[in-house]
Amino acid sequence: MRTFLSALAIVAALAPPLLAEPDWKALTDETAQILSAYAKIDTTNPPGNELPAAEFLQATLAKDGIESKLYPSAPGRANLVARIKGTGKAQPILLLHHMDVVPAQASDWSFPPFSGAIEDGFVYGRGTLDDKGGGVVQLGALLARVREHKRCARDLIFLAVADEEVGGAEGAIFMVKNHLDDIRAGGLLFLPPMEVDLKPYEASDGVYTNRLKTELAHDLTYLCPAPLDPNQVEELNWLTAAVFRVCGCYDASRVDFRLDENDNFKPYILEINPLPGLAPKISDLVIEANAINIGHTELVNRILDAAIRRHGLR
């Protein structure tokens, strides 16, 4: 009995504590102070000079043991990436903000634009709204998660970029061109919608029958991208994403719609195909991908890569 109790006591001592709700009031006060200090760093663009801001973020993250890396893009300019590893059961999410700000005329301000003053519950300074404030909210979320000692299902990638206000060449564009794998996150790539011209077959088939898909596939006219206005495309993409997630699909799927020309082209969902065909030149997904210069080999590799990442094999 003593052995059992001793063992039980040891197990209890080693067991992790129950996760407590973060002290949101304390975290709010802390992030306000972080934002105040961040706003004091003059990153007016041009010239930007975001390196000191990136170093400040790096030091702030390091206090909680969060490692980060600087990516210099020009003299005095840098981008920063921090990653909190998840379990790999879901795709990474990217938390992005920019460190540079537009010029500020001091005479237009109640407080000096780089004072970071805290008054009546507000932090004053250039960038507190666009976009240092947003970045500090993201940083606060990282701190809360790390302090809970609980891993997310996905990696959390914190990206602070330079040069958003003047073109992005030294910021987001630089990172995508040179370090894409370090910031690659999950998400859905929407291929352009395709319309099958069924007018020649209205009398014989009426709808997109299997006969048309197979026997007459080479005779059909595919309109890709379909002649739709941007609002229609956005609505179809939204519905596609909703169906994809509700049905629990993975990697690649095709959603078929019918647009009612008698009701302002209102879309109706016909079906979702979670295993769409990939036959070169004739499969719908292949045609749609080709419309945005994604060839057959690249398309297949992208689908395989998504599955490999999902299973944590890379």
Image (spheres, rainbow, N blue to C red):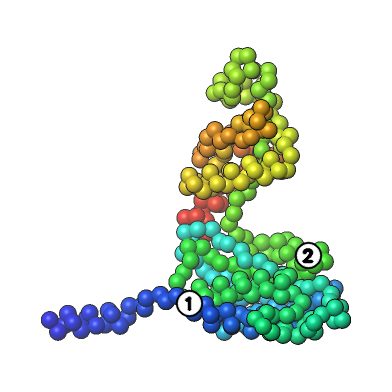
SS class of the residue under badge 1?
loop
Image side of residue 196 versus residue 64, left or right: right
Q: Residue furthest top?
A: 203
Circle on res. 229: none
Residue at the image point whose x is 52% and y is 37% from the top? 273
Circle on res. 22: 1
* Frontmost residue, 216 versus 230: 230
Which image quarter: residue 299?
top right
In the rendered view, tell whether residue 228 sits above or below residue 53: above
Q: Quadrant of the N terminus?
A: bottom left
Q: Amino acid at mark 1?
A: Pro
* Percent coordinates x, y for residue 98 in the rendering: 72, 70
**Where does label 2 land, which residue?**
168
Residue at the image point whose x is 84% and y is 75% from the top? 103
SS class of the residue under badge 2?
loop
Which image quarter: residue 42?
bottom right
Residue at the image point whose x is 16% and y is 82% from the top? 3
Which image quarter: residue 52?
bottom right
* Frontmost residue, 2 versus 202: 202
* Percent coordinates x, y for residue 80 in the rendering: 67, 73
Question: Crowdedness of circle 2 by 10 Å Cα count: few (<14), some, many (20+)?
Answer: some
